[in-house]
Amino acid sequence: MTPRRWPSRKQSLAWLAGLALLAAGVGVWRLLRQDPKVVVAITSWPGYESFYLAEQRRLGQRFGLDLRVQQYSSLDDQRAAYGRGDVDIIATTIPDAIAICQEAPSRCPQLILVLDQSVGADVLVSRREITSVRDLVGQRVGLERAVLSEYLLLRALESERLGLDQVRLVHEGPQGLVAAFTRGDLAAVVTYPPHANPLRADPRYRVLFSSLQTPGEVLDVLAVNPAFAQRHPDRVRNLVRTWWASRALVQAEPVASQALMAQREQVSPAAFLESERWIRYPGRGEQDRLLGQSGAVAQVVSRMAAHMVAARRIEPEEPLPKPTRAFLVQP
């Protein structure tokens, strides 16, 4: 019997090197096969939860996208993260997008989709004995360090020809504001669902002013870093497709979808549904008109910027966010 010959050290090393190359090749192949990851930064607001629904139900995979949602505790924190370059896509408000252009002009975002419109969701709530905005002069008014909150308060005060300097501003996070208000530490508070829901239902308080009194102004948008959009236009378009898939799922499976979104907001499905009463979602057919060069979004940006300049909250020479229809997709 011919004795078995073991491979030489040189042959063994060559064999191991071949295996390593094969494993590396498989790893690269798997990496290339993976859907590209796209991160969307959101805050706790019912209108943004369709992105969470899309992430949980993996709706992006239909379009070759790995959608990840990144949660921030406030619009202020989210805006700072975008300005630093931590994230490139955010669901945000128009005044906060305007503020980004002031704070980080090189990252002044493009507004590629109108997600929702607040139709009374954003509110200025006061104690019952305060019957008008004028009664807030000299009083402590609570609000987040979010530009939208300040803008809504500004618009409320302007309705009585008052300015921000005529009230005492107290800044806090959304939950802390409600807690301070219910303790009696504040005369009024600017808030929104789900934090506003128990205040609306409590007879000790009243809604002094809301986004119903600024029709068409309080819009939430999907804002994208222009450099990212230029590098990855297909990813951005597929993100828009994913949004519409999520909205379609809400329509097709409302109970299950609302239960999932309510769970993330840490409210009951009934409370989540109550929040949705004050929010309208523009459809696909409206986006072209809203995002046109002289459309509603461009008009709102211009009008809000003028109010913010007049109130000395922003400088007039900085750029403004630009709406674009470049990433709209057909059904």
Image (tube, rainbow, N blue to C red):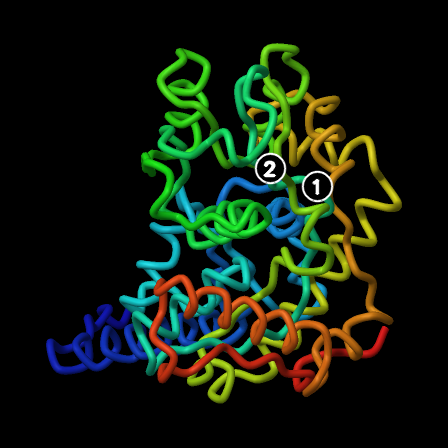
Q: Quarter-wise, where is residue 132 in the image? A: top right
User: In the image, what residue occupies the spot 38% across and 19% down?
Assistant: 180
Give percent across and percent down for residue 239.
63, 68
Mark 1 and mark 2 residues within 8 Å of each other at the beta carbon:
yes
Residue 82 makes an appearance in the image: yes
Q: Secondary structure at mark 2?
A: strand
**37 shown above or below 280:** below
User: In the image, what residue occupies the spot 65% across and 75% down?
Assistant: 299
- Residue 319 lies left or right of residue 249; in this view the side is left
Amino acid tagged 1: Gly
Disc 1 from disc 2: Cα separation: 7 Å
Considering every residue shown, the one lying at the far left of the view is 9
Residue marked by disc 2? 123
User: In the image, what residue occupies the spot 40% across and 62% down?
Assistant: 311
Give percent across and percent down for residue 309.
41, 70
**Tally of numbered discs:** 2
Residue marked by disc 1? 120
**238 shown above or below 211:** below
Which of the image's four quarters has the C terminus?
Answer: bottom right
Towards the viewer: 177 or 26: 177
Towards the viewer: 67 or 24: 67
